[in-house]
Amino acid sequence: MINELAHYFSYEFVRNAMMVGIMIALGAALLGVPLVLKRYSFIGDGLSHVAFGALAIASVLNLTNNMLIIMPVTVITAVVLLSLGQNAKIKGDAAIALISVSALAIGYILLNVFSVSSNVGGDVCSTLFGATSLLTLTKTDVAICFVSIAIVIAVYVFTYNKMLAVTFDEDFAKATGVNANGYNFLLATVTAVIIVIAMKLVGTLLISALIIFPALSAMRVFRSYKSVVIASLVIALICAVTGIIASILLSTPTGATIVVANLAVFIIFSLIDLIK
């Protein structure tokens, strides 16, 4: 097995896939803790559907760089979705159903009506659940991913104290002069960036798992905010590496394998919590 892995990792595209997978997993896990604590985890699922709709539009327009549409549309929707979630007339669960399902349906219709491929079903399935495109990443893709994740981590580190205050007691944070709405929008925006970057790794339907699972697993065992964040990063790192290696050896879909690895860790940590 070691020799087989050494053979695979002698190829640049496998090393690129591993680096991108690790960076995305760490970025998603970092944002997952405040999102789960603030009951905003639904944003990840909703924005992933919106990203699919934007991808469909970019495909219909035959854009060489689909990020020109996917990134701005997803970021704008993150802000709109958060605004709807704060509206008393449209609660968070209704907002996620309204926007995400609509985007998913419109995207699928566009791909069927304006088909640019003879295998629409296969293309849609690959987009939703992840595809082999992860193994065709270029150095440019890796560089873009690295810079984007570095910006996300930098934003999180520099706003750590304010984000902590807004996460646990938004009303108190507002009373002390913290722009809570601004930090909520910032959190939604960087989450949108993570989701768009992660589309090649796990597909649009499985992205939210990278955000939610590490945080939920860490919360089964650890109690302080800092320890949960650190544990989430470690869990995300282990699951990303394990999932990618397992997908290579077993010839399974990369995204789904990483999610299953996260599920296994969640079950283990839940059992530890019960024993305690």
Image (cartoon, rainbow, N blue to C red):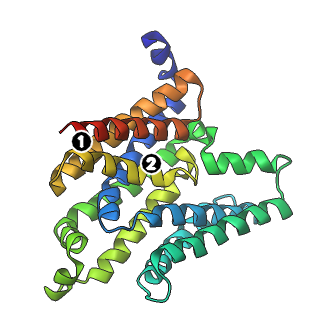
Distance, label 2 to label 1, CA atoms, is 39 Å
Q: Position of residue 97 (x, y in %)?
A: 57, 71
Quadrant of the rendered structure where residue 35 is? bottom left
Residue 77 visible here: no
Q: Residue at x 27, y 81 (%)?
A: 180
Q: Nearer the viewer, mark 2 or mark 1?
A: 1
Helix, strand or loop for disc 1: helix
Nearer-the-camera pick, 225 or 26: 225
Q: Position of residue 15 (x, y in %)?
A: 46, 31
Q: Amino acid at mark 1?
A: Asp
Q: Residue at x 54, y 36 (%)?
A: 254
Whether residue 129 is situated above or below residue 94 in the rendered picture: above
Nearer-the-camera pick, 92 or 71: 92
Whether residue 86 is situated above or below residue 105 in the rendered picture: below
Quadrant of the rendered structure where residue 172 is? bottom left
Q: Position of residue 270 (x, y in %)?
A: 30, 41
Would residue 215 be found to the left or right of residue 166 on screen? right
Label 1, residues with CA under 10 Å away: few <14, some 14-19, many ≥20: some
Give the residue number, with chain letter if any, for mark 2: 143
Query: How many tags in the picture?
Result: 2
Nearer-the-camera pick, 224 or 129: 224
Q: Which mark is residue 150?
A: none
Q: Residue at x 25, y 40 (%)?
A: 274
Residue 204 visible here: yes
Label 2, residues with CA under 10 Å away: few <14, some 14-19, many ≥20: few
Q: Residue at x 82, y 55 (%)?
A: 116
Q: Amino acid at mark 2?
A: Ala
* Mark before the other along the chain sequence, 2 or 1: 2
Nearer-the-camera pick, 166 or 54: 166
Give the residue number, with chain letter if any, for mark 1: 273
Q: Position of residue 129 (x, y in %)?
A: 61, 46
CB under 8 Å between discs 2 and 1: no
